[in-house]
Image (cartoon, grey):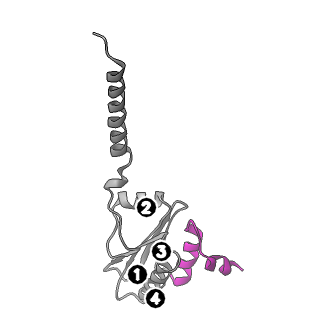
Amino acid sequence: MKIKSSHLGLILILIMLVSSLATQRFYYPSARIALPEKSIIDYQLTPEQEIYLIQKGYTVILFKYSLTCDNCLDVKTSLEQFTTSDNRHQIILEEIESPVDVSNITISSMKGEENLINATIENVTDTLCEILIYPPVECALREV
């Protein structure tokens, strides 16, 4: 039995279509990852969400704090201001209330990860200036 060239062409087109759909489904899982709509959230991201965001150039800040902590609310306010300024398109801030009386901040980006315990505003700002992919102008001004 001979296959006509038009049938062969249709078979090849069908194979290409099926393979491209399969590739998109299995190699690009981002379509299945729900991303936060805001840059400040009150829950922790899944590992898949965090990895995807970091691969896309975001810096993810996990801030665990207690309401009884001395400087936690000041650090929280500073992180929120930093996140909502010109950096809102590169930072996701996770604010998680914790029973521990000291703050714990984990800052992750493509440049690495830093963990700060009971950090001051100065420590947090210095670390953010080092680890952000696109540091703001304020970081350059701090070094002068």
**Residue of label 3:** 88
**Residue 101 vs residue 54: left or right?**
left
Q: Residues within 10 Å of mark 4 (few under 14, many from 20)?
A: few
* 46 versus 122 height, above or below: above
Q: Amino acid at mark 1?
A: Val
Q: Residue at x 56, y 65 (%)?
A: 133
Q: Residue furthest right?
A: 144
- Give the quarter of the figure containing the C terminus: bottom right
Which tag, 1 or 3, sits closer to the chain's start? 3
59 inside magenta stretch: no
From mark 1 to mark 2, how far is it between C-alphas? Answer: 27 Å
> Residue 102's mark?
1
Query: Label 4, on which residue?
Result: 74
Type of amino acid under label 4: Asp
Labels 3, 4: front one: 3
Label 3 vs 4, first from the N-terminus: 4
- Looking at the image, which is closer to me, 86 or 6? 6
Position of residue 56 in the picture relative to residue 11 (left or right)? right
Give the residue at mark 2: 53
* Residue 5 placement, left or right of 136: left
- The residue mark sitting in front, 1 or 4, is 4
Q: Is-magenta flag for residue 125?
A: yes
Q: Callout 2: helix, strand or loop? A: helix
Question: Between residues 16 and 37, which one lies in front from this camera angle?
Answer: 16
Give, as a three-letter code, the residue at label 3. Arg
Residue lying farthest top?
Answer: 1
Q: Which residues are magenta?
A: 120-144
| Disc nearest the viewer among 2 and 4 | 2
**Separation of marks 3 and 4 at Cα, in angstroms:** 19 Å
Locate residue 96, reporting x and y percent.
34, 76
Which residue is at 35% across, 83% downward? 66
Name the residue: 36% across, 31% down. Answer: 13
